[in-house]
């Protein structure tokens, strides 16, 4: 089986967009790959400046993925920071990457374009990400289009290292570009933590219902036919209940079926899908000691792989 690796940045409590756009697709890989999932806490440090909040997000994210079905018996789940070998590899890689390539990094360029002055963590972000990937002999990395450039840099530097120091030192990974859906938020724009348009994953049912009832819709009267495609309510419904979606589309387009009805149906479907996960999340999140122990045990196994890679790299470059 090939190895697939997924990095998750703990920068906020996950929302429904993260679940449908990232968590659910990533967890569907376990049947086809040997899977590794890790919490990229040192990457989060480029933006999160509140230690207590970061501590919380790390556990929120781990508990969310576990509650959504990540099975630690079948996959490896660990924290990036529990495997410090990643920094050793990042240094070696950085000596093979031209600063010009990092200056062309999208995230770095965006900060500069906003007239802000980026920290060196943002500049070096792709180097640490390459080390995350190469440390574990990763064959494929499931990513969205926004991470393509990072994968290209990872492949470049791995190829360069192999070329300089011997083929077979590092596994050159492939990007697995998924067709993950873009999940709209309550205002119809891409759901995002920073836009305040998020649908919460694990808030109580009542709160979830209130947020869903607040989704923006067009203003036809009850009797009017309504456009299903392009409406946020229908788009979300199609993602949550694809089997039932044609029926909702028919009813909306026929008229006599209000947005309130559609939102009620959406709420029922979301609540049915995430209700059991919410219970699991609350139980996992409540026992921090057990959650931390689980992450540490994942890290112990991850470190074995990391150690072997670092030994190989050290030997190859002449530092052994
Ligand atoms: P970003 O990557 O925009 O900072 P997150 O940290 O929330 O946002 O993203 C974590 C993962 O969730 C990424 O893989 C991202 O593509 C996915 N994701 C976030 N928001 C959405 C959305 N509205 N629709 C689909 N996927 C999303
Ligand atoms: N950069 C990724 C993101 O913003 C997170 C990440 C860090 C990652 N290291 C990784 C993803 C290694 C895949 C592989 O979402």
Image (tube, rainbow, N blue to C red):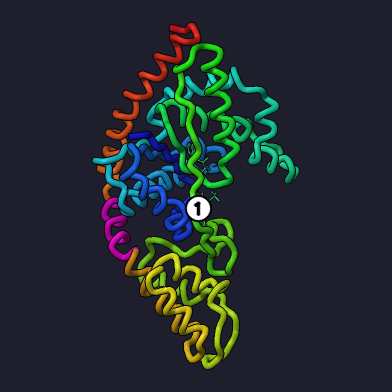
122 and 152: which one is in front?
Answer: 152
Residue 18 percent coordinates (x, y): 46, 55
Secondary structure mostly seen in the magenta stretch: helix
> As drawn, is 154 to the left or to the right of 276?
right
> As drawn, is 194 to the left or to the right of 59?
right
Q: Which residue is mark 1?
A: 179
How packed mark 1 is, by other alpha carbons closer than 10 Å (few <14, some 14-19, many 20 or more), is: few
Residue 85 percent coordinates (x, y): 42, 22
Q: Is residue 97 above or below residue 254?
A: above
251 and 273: which one is in front?
Answer: 251
108 and 273: which one is in front?
Answer: 273
Q: Is residue 276 magenta?
A: yes
Which residue does the image show at 36% across and 50% down from the upper left?
28
Q: Secondary structure at mark 1?
A: loop
Which residue does the image show at 36% across and 52% down from the upper left?
64
Q: Is residue 111 magenta?
A: no
Which residue does the image show at 47% across and 71% down from the upper left?
211
How many numbered marks have been drawn onto this rendered protein structure? 1
> As drawn, is 208 to the left or to the right of 252?
left
Q: Which residues are magenta?
A: 274-286
Ligand 1 neighbours mark 1 (CB distance < 8 Å): no
Which residue does the image show at 53% across and 93% down from the upper left?
223
User: In which quadrant of the rendered view does residue 230 lie?
Assistant: bottom right
Q: Is residue 67 above or below residue 76?
A: below
């Amino acid at each position: 089986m090939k190895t697939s690796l997924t990095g998750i940045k703990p920068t906020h409590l996950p929302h429904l967009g993260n679940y449908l756009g990232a968590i659910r697709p990533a967890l569907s890989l376990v049947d086809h790959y040997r899977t590794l999932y890790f919490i990229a806490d040192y990457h989060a440090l480029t933006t999160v400046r509140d230690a207590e909040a970061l501590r919380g997000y790390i556990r929120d994210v781990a508990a969310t993925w576990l509650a959504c079905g990540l099975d630690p018996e079948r996959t490896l789940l660990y924290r990036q920071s529990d495997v410090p070998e990643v920094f050793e590899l990042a240094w070696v890689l950085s000596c093979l990457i031209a600063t010009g390539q990092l200056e062309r990094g999208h995230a770095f360029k965006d900060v500069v374009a906003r007239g802000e002055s980026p920290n060196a963590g943002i500049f070096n972000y792709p180097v640490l990400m390459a080390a995350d990937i190469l440390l574990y002999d990763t064959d494929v990395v499931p990513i969205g289009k926004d991470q393509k450039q990072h994968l290209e840099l990872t492949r470049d530097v791995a190829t360069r290292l192999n070329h300089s120091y011997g083929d077979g030192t590092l596994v050159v990974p492939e990007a697995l570009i998924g067709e993950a859906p873009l999940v709209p938020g309550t205002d119809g724009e891409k759901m995002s933590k920073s836009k305040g348009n998020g649908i919460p994953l694990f808030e109580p049912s009542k709160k979830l219902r209130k947020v869903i009832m607040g989704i923006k819709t067009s203003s036809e009267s009850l009797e009017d036919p309504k456009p299903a495609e392009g409406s946020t309510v229908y788009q979300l419904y199609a993602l949550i209940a694809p089997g039932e979606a044609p029926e909702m589309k028919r009813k909306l387009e026929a008229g006599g079926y209000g947005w309130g009805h559609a939102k009620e149906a959406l709420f029922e479907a979301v609540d049915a899908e995430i209700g059991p996960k919410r219970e699991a999340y609350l139980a996992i999140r409540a026992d921090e000691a057990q959650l931390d122990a689980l992450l540490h045990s994942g890290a112990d196994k991850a470190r074995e792989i990391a150690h072997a890679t670092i030994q190989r790299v050290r030997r190859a470059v002449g530092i052994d």
